[in-house]
Image (tube, helix red, strand yellow):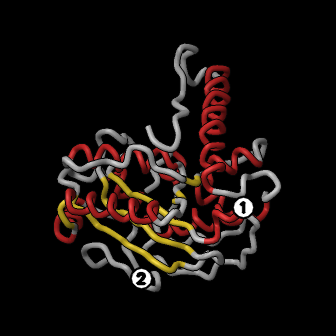
Amino acid sequence: MSDGAHNVDRMQPVAPEPLFDDDFLDAPRAVAYASSPAPPLVASATWCDRIGVFDLETTGVDVAEDRIVTAHVGVLDAEGGLVRQYTWLADPGVDIPEGATAVHGITTAHARAHGRPSPEVVGEIVAALRAIFAEGLPVVAYNAPFDFSMLKYEALRNGLPPILDPSPVIDPLVLDKCVDRYRKGKRTLDAVCAHYEVVLEAAHTAAADAVAAGRVAQVLAQRFADRLPADGASLHTSQIAWARAQAESLTEYFIRIGRIDKDDRLDGSWPIR
């Protein structure tokens, strides 16, 4: 992967990279990303005519303490085609744990040799997202509170103005749980892509995950047009309530099976914590 951020017309091969979840650690690591044609989409929702996509791969799952390693910000058209993209490789300034490398493939040595300084990368990611929001486009991020919270703390750490209230945001994880609440099985990005027949190649690279999440969101908009608000602002507002309810439901389940104490609660804040 070449250094820095790039705006290109077609997806270029990039080195592997995480969305960090317990389930992701068991997935096979991919070595390259090749763009795949998206299925034709004709959805009634206006927000999915043109969408931003965003994903981070990091040194770990602690949004306040871990660091960004790779990132992708892009724009998809109504058919799911990638029309704009920016990719970054950062030197996070700390060692990348072996567990993280096992997921995204980036070693400490590689990041130090080829990554750009973290403050520069974080600043450019923030600027790219601000520009997309300024265009009035929603930004799709799978498990949005992870990516946007990580970016917020990285900006604060580097003395940069953070994005504190990203909007509108579309989170396919929240949408999928809302429209198909009782479906059994995992809700990881690769599992959800398989369910909705969205191609995901080189899972756990920021570019592949971001694009696949955007295409899942577009499929959901088409398949559940009668159940999802048609405009991005209304859908954003709805997801705030849905995410809170989902966290409360999961909290009660975890208490019931003894996974957490009855006084503990999962944080249902969305799309940023």
Residue sitting nearer the eye, 56 or 104: 56
Q: Quadrant of residue 90?
A: bottom left
The answer to whether 6 is drawn above or below residue 226 in the figure is below
Residue at 65% x, 50% y is 235
- The residue carrying mark 2 is 12
Secondary structure at numbered mark 1: helix
Alpha carbons under labels 1 and 2: distance apart: 27 Å
- Residue neighbourhood size for the residue with mark 2, other residues' Cα within 10 Å, grouped as few (<14), some (14–19), many (≥20): some
Quarter of the image for the N terminus: give it.
bottom left
Residue at 42% x, 75% y is 85
Residue type of the residue flagged with mark 1: Ala
- The residue carrying mark 1 is 221
- Residue neighbourhood size for the residue with mark 1, other residues' Cα within 10 Å, grouped as few (<14), some (14–19), many (≥20): many
Q: Quadrant of residue 195?
A: bottom right
Residue type of the residue flagged with mark 2: Gln
Q: Earlier in the sequence, mark 1 or mark 2?
A: 2
